Amino acid sequence: MEVIKYILLGILQGFTEPLPISSSGHLVLIENLFNIGPLSDVNFEIVVNFGSFLAILFIFWKDIVKLVTSFFQFIGNKKTREKTKNDFKYCLMILIGSIPVGIAGILLKDKIDAFSNNTKILGVAFLITAFLLFFVKNSKGTKEDKDITIKDAIIIGLMQMIALLPGISRSGTVLVGCLLCGLSRKASLKYTFMLYFPVSIASMGLGLLDIVEAGNLETLLLPYTLGLLAACIVTYLSYKWLSNIVQKGKLWKFSIYCFCLGLFVLFYFR
């Protein structure tokens, strides 16, 4: 039963991670509803996040290889600069867009952690996510990857910073930021998950130390591995579903879910 519980939590993480409904918020909600122990295990959360990371990495592998290659070619080879300048600029926009959440994560980590299990804040956060998603329901941007400006990257980065609070979706707020800045749906989806990598790598790097220091890996190796695999597989499928919804301009449908969920949390945990 313990192993099954970890698998189910991996599925939950995998399903909610790409979607604009807040994976961390759902984990906190399930913990409070059913008093499930593993959710208080920060190490397990790091493991299933890594599973989601692997799935997103697999989806965008070709784009990442191309961007990284172009970045270093632009720096090291003057002959290829004209050919690689757009990819180099895109890499810079990813770095700039990641700065606000990086600074906020370092400076506000303790305060954010103090709010992480507050159900009232969680309910309000779901409602904020619902409002943001509904606000951009008619957005039809035309900007592509090469058109992202420093101003756009900063605005989108600030939106991502808001998502440090559980219940406010990272993918949702970044998608909203992209759409508000006039990016096309396709470009918005790509930039949203390109910004996912720096944040995810940083959090996993810090969390890896905690896993090593925990000293109980042998007993949890099987459930952790199964949870990771579950999160990886379901994240891949969930992203494909999200991509289809975004391309059709139906992102607002998630706002209905988040609105109902926010009201439920506020009334249930009064």
Image (tube, rainbow, N blue to C red):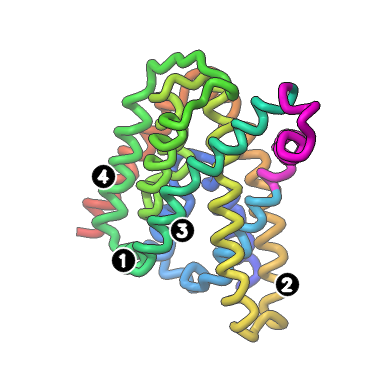
* SS for dot 4: helix
Q: How far apart are the two marked residues, 4 and 3, measured between alpha carbons?
A: 17 Å
Q: Which residue is mark 3?
A: 27
Q: Which label number is shown at residue 263?
A: 4
Choose the circle earlier in sequence order: 1 or 2.
1
Choose the circle earlier in sequence order: 4 or 3.
3
* SS for dot 3: helix
Q: Which residue is mark 2?
A: 222
Residue 33 position (above or below residue 253): below
Q: How far apart are the two marked residues, 2 and 3, measured between alpha carbons?
A: 21 Å
> What residue type is disc 3 on?
Leu
Q: Does residue 142 appear to the left or right of 32 in the view shown?
A: right
Q: Position of residue 90 (x, y in %)?
A: 60, 32
Q: Which label number is shown at residue 64?
A: none
In depth, the one of 74 and 213 nearer the eye is 74
**Crowding near pointer 4: few (<14 within 10 Å), some, many (20+)?**
some
* SS for dot 2: helix
Residue 49 position (above or below residue 262): below
> Which residues, given as a range, are shown in magenta?
55-82
Q: Nearer the viewer, mark 1 or mark 2?
A: 1
Q: Position of residue 193 (x, y in %)?
A: 58, 39
Q: Does residue 223 appear to the left or right of 111 in the view shown?
A: right
Residue at the image position 37 percent from the left and 31 percent from the top: 133
Q: Which label number is shown at residue 111?
A: 1
Q: Does residue 205 appear to the left or right of 141 in the view shown?
A: right
Choose the circle earlier in sequence order: 4 or 2.
2
Q: Position of residue 125 (x, y in %)?
A: 31, 48
Q: How far apart are the two marked residues, 1 and 4, measured between alpha carbons?
A: 25 Å
**Crowding near pointer 3: few (<14 within 10 Å), some, many (20+)?**
many
In depth, the one of 104 and 130 nearer the eye is 104
> What residue type is disc 2 on?
Leu
Residue at the image position 63 percent from the left and 51 percent from the top: 52
